[in-house]
């Protein structure tokens, strides 16, 4: 594994073009001992993010269906309601597929993920221009939901459009760490927060050992 020394890196002001010039999928070591890297995710090739979204949707709909079966167990409307839910589920899947395709096109096939890792924890952010695109998509989604009377969509879209461009997990608060080597992915999970840590292939073992060695309160698993 090749590690390049760098004086400092400010992810909050880094554009996608500057990230490419700096170096993608390379581990940088700052003077203060912080490790940084910029991972270029090909969303239509590495489907881990898409599978995670589908899993969340499936779990949500499973809960809705179980609740529906319980509430309509003594009525004759169960099959009709399940049919409606099935159509809605199919529509949601189609929307998700289109959204991933659209995001991939807007990001020109390269989703830039910036990571900062030190002894205390790990942080994730986007490049500034891609963060602006993400917020614009969320704001558009909120506006469309408002026009359609979808209160949940308005709340979700508004929340995403106002979200910060950086998420951090303190190692002392991490509850579980899960690795998936085939997808260059390490999940670092705290309470109600799931960070997807993508790692360059030749640095995966180093980052995995670094993280798991500091998450003393976490359940560790890999496959």
Image (cartoon, rainbow, N blue to C red):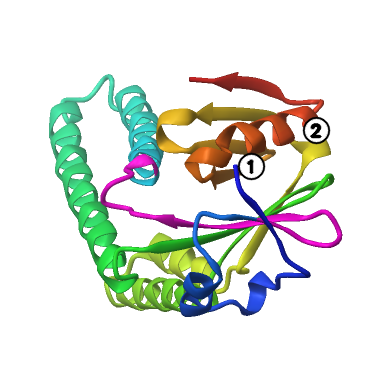
Sequence-first disc among 1 and 2: 1
Q: Nearer the viewer, mark 1 or mark 2?
A: 2
For label 1, the SS is: loop
* Chain part drawn in magenta: 28-48
Q: Quadrant of residue 36?
A: bottom right
Asked if residue 7 is among those painted magenta in the image, a careful observer would answer no
Quarter placement of the N terminus: top right
Residue 215 vertical position relative to residue 114 in the rendered view, above or below: above
Q: Return the x and y of residue 219 as percentages of the image width and height.
A: 69, 21
> Which mark, by number, is residue 214?
2
Residue 204 vertical position relative to residue 29 in the rendered view, above or below: above
Q: Return the x and y of residue 175 as percentages of the image width and height.
A: 71, 30
| Total numbered circles | 2
Query: Observer-nearest residue: 122 or 167?
Result: 122
Q: Quadrant of residue 157?
A: bottom left
Badge 2: residue crowd in 10 Å (few <14, some 14–19, many ≥20) = some
Q: Quadrant of residue 208?
A: top right
């Amino acid at each position: 594994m090749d590690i390049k020394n760098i004086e400092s890196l400010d992810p909050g002001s880094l554009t996608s073009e500057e990230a490419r010039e700096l170096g993608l999928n390379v581990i940088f070591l700052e003077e203060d001992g912080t490790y940084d890297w910029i991972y270029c995710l090909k969303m239509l090739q590495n489907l881990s993010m898409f599978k995670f979204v589908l899993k969340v949707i499936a779990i949500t709909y499973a809960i809705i269906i179980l609740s529906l079966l319980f509430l309509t167990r003594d009525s004759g409307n169960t099959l009709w309601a399940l049919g409606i839910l099935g159509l809605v589920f199919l529509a949601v899947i189609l929307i998700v597929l289109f959204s991933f395709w659209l995001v991939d096109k807007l990001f020109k096939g390269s989703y830039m993920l910036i990571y900062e890792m030190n002894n205390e924890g790990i942080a994730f952010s986007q490049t500034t221009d891609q963060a602006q695109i993400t917020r614009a998509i969320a704001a558009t989604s909120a506006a469309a939901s408002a026009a359609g009377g979808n209160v949940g969509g308005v709340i979700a879209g508004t929340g995403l459009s106002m979200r910060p461009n950086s998420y951090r997990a303190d190692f002392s608060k991490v509850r579980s760490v899960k690795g998936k080597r085939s997808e260059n992915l390490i999940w670092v999970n705290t309470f109600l927060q799931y960070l997807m840590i993508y790692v360059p292939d030749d640095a995966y073992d180093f980052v995995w050992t670094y993280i798991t060695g500091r998450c003393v309160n976490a359940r560790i698993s890999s496959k």
